[in-house]
Image: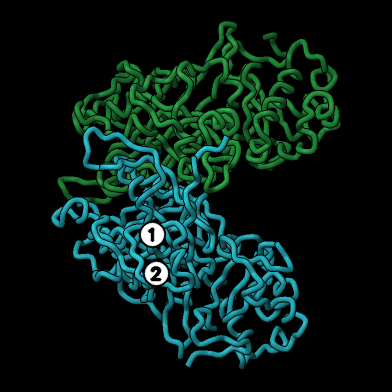
Chain colours: A green, B cyan
Amino acid sequence: MAGSWVDIPADSDFSLANIPFGIVSTPNDPSSHAAVAIGTSILDLKVLFTSSASPFLTTQIIPSLAGHEHVFAQPTLNAFAELGRAVHREVRAGIQALIAADTSHPDVLRDNAPLREAALLPQRAVTLHLPMSIGDYTDFYAGYHHAYAVGVMFRGPANALQPNYTHLPVGYHGRASSIVVSGTPVRRPVGQILLDEKPVTAPSRRLDFELELGCFISRANAQGTSVAVDEADKEFIFGYVLLNDWSARDIQAWEYVPLGPFNSKNFASTISPWVVLADALEPFRAAAIPNSTPLQGYLQEPKDKKSVFDIKLEVDLTTPESDTTTVCRTSSRNLLWSFPQMIAHHTLGGCPLRAGDLLGSGTISGPDASERGSLLELSEGGKKDVLLYGMDARTFLKDGDTVTLRGYCADGNGARVGFGECRGRIYGPSSN
Amino acid sequence: MGRRSWLPIATSSPFSLANIPFGIISSTTSPVHRPATVVGAHVLDLKVFAERNGFSGLEAIHPHLDVFSAATLNRFAQLGRPLHGKVRTYLQSVLADDTPLPQILRDNHDLRAAAIIPLADITTHLPMEIGDYTDFFAGIHHASAVGSLFRGPANALQPNYKHLPVAYHSRASSVVVSGTPVRRPWGQILLDPTAEPKIPTLAPCRRLDIELELGAFIGKANPLGQPVPVAEAEKAIFGYVLMNDWSARDLQTWEYVPLGPFNAKNFATTISPWVVLPDALEPFATAGIENDVEVLPYLRAENKQYDIRLKVDMKTAKSGEEATTVTETSGKNLLWSFAQMVAHHTIGGCNMRAGDLLGSGTISGTDDRSRGSLLEQNQAGRKTIGLAGGEERKFLADGDTVTITGVCGSEEDGLVGFGECSGQILEAVETPFFR
């Protein structure tokens, strides 16, 4: 792929091969609206599609967007998502064509100084917001190595996984209201914790992170209908983000029987701000963890199907003293279930999905000790110190710790498709 | 003696002048979704009423009249309880037969013609936009009965049950208004739950159940990171509805360990259309079930409930209009108040928003015909339930219509009720995935 006339550092997540979508507010326009990330810049799509260049763009380059340009002035990407994969594809390709070094349309943007200055802004000059309005958030549990490791901790190897685990993608409804964008501080939750067999009210002492991949739904299915697994793959997925499903392990242990995790999860979940479109990840498909259980028909994917993605994932823990340790390096291929399978299962009984719904993969861990996507696993249930740079150690998170999730794929030509940061800093409940 | 209206109100109507609930309607003359209240067999279209100076006698609402043009009640709910109370009292006053403001509506023939619509000419819609729906488990008699069925009486309740209001996040997108048909879901089920190894079958649900619940809508948001103290929590509530948390028991058994019920619940939840304000229920406040455990300070509050006479009626495809009452119980049969639920839900900093829905959990009394689920009545499938006309049921059959009603007070003082929370079961689709 040729380079861009926009300056894109070689190791940028936001290469020409990516073009992720987000919601920004800018110095000139404090109302939230759509943009894409390119290198260290953003391309303001509201500016672009309200400019005098817009008619040319929608007649010559992106005809399927004609009549729908207003979607980029909306405060969320939901209306854009609902236009469908074909439109997303054309818009993304159109933007790539516009910013390619060898663009066939240099006068639209590259050589159009006033428009270029209005539309191309440094990322550090803008504020990023939640990219979508999230009607429902469902968290799955498809990270096999995480589920197994945690199961061993609580039930021993023979009963580590429940009988249902390989038959259906286990999931639970999460809290939509407390999903925040990267950079939002995260308050250590107070809750009921069992201490010496008596419940007390206290700040959580076992605050954890969970490395997950998030998937945004692009369109609705009518209540009472189900989405087939291949249709889910082709039509229902808008794009992906990184997701940190912060967890309070002590609150969870006391509350979760029999109805599942609740206050242990609903105090905050953080997502990265740039939605990487499904098309951008196509070159990085990989085979999921093999499932030897015979699956029901609705969950079956073709035998050689590469149904997950090989995204290199990393978790950094930064202490209040500003020492950073990479505590986890793994791949998002370490999933037993694909998102299309999760969508098919979620809608099996007729549950309606809507554009903007968020699905979480579940904590992603790999088979190796260096690939553990939560402190619960890294500290082996809180029994082992996780050694950090700066002579420090952790079992669980301390006030002032920052956890940063990163993820990227790179093709042979070095073009990176990455997610930016999914970051949050913990503060104590007393420091409101 | 309850106040009478210049509109005719049958003494048996749940929508006496003592009520004044709020809902969202469309009409045969206009498809636009807009706020309304209901009195007897008529609705008052609040959009038209507001646009045509109906609120001229209530200065406090003048800066906010635009809330009555909204397609949901969320913006009205955000105005806060004092203002809701003033609006309710004002509407009672305008509709009373001894109204001090006859010129507003009673004697204003044009406005009456435009704003008063017979119930038969309107359709109700979901009254609020629901950002999150949380279902609690506060019906202790239900929890004990179900726990006992599965774990024996000694282990009926989990150790946490009396210490915290147990709850799970449920699915907002599948909450529907009364009258919406409910399609029997497909799912993975174990034909024989005791067989080893456990191999599931893909089939339509065979153990489709009801759950009689009360629903509470949040009106006042709290910011992320700022818990709502229990003494403040009641103020966060906008109003109440009836709820049927339809449940697929066989789907639940196979899926729910360890993360809780999922497809067993997310296919549909039905609510009644008229949101009854706390002010209307206040005369019927009473004590709920006493907790014999000393709860932690953040939960310490009176267990305030409402003495709502709840009823579940069933009609079948064969029975026509003839219904059997399968459940009669009281809304006070709860261990936790909604204020305690809100305090617990926000203790870690979770943010509630206007329009959020909380379910009480299945409400059951202690005797046979006071059970809010068929699972309890059929003793986990061992007993049949007799219906009028000689039919029998364990779980729901296709064509069954379940209607929940609830009412407080006396006809003399004016009944305060919810209308119907009703749904008919449609047969499962032939195969779940159309191509």
Q: What residue is at 34 percent from the left and 22 percent from the top? A: A292
Q: Position of residue A314 (x, y in %)?
A: 43, 20
- The residue to which callout 2 is attached is B312
Dot 1: what SS?
loop
Q: What residue is at 68 percent from the left and 25 percent from the top? A: A89
Q: Check disc 1 and give the amino acid type.
A: Ile
Q: What residue is at 60 percent from the left and 26 percent from the top? A: A277
Dot 2: what SS?
strand
Tags 1 and 2 touching, CB below 8 Å: yes
Q: Position of residue A6 (x, y in %)?
A: 71, 16
Question: Would you say A410 lies left or right of A45 here?
Answer: left
Circle 1 Cα neighbour tier, 10 Å, few/some/many (<14 / 14–19 / ≥20) = many
Distance of label 1 from label 2 (alpha carbons): 9 Å
Quarter occupied by residue A157 = top left
- The residue to which callout 1 is attached is B210
Quarter occupied by residue A248 = top left
Please count the marks in the image: 2
Circle 2 Cα neighbour tier, 10 Å, few/some/many (<14 / 14–19 / ≥20) = many
Question: Would you say B394 lies left or right of A422 here?
Answer: left
Quarter of the figure that contains the N terminus of chain A: top right
Q: Check disc 2 and give the amino acid type.
A: Val
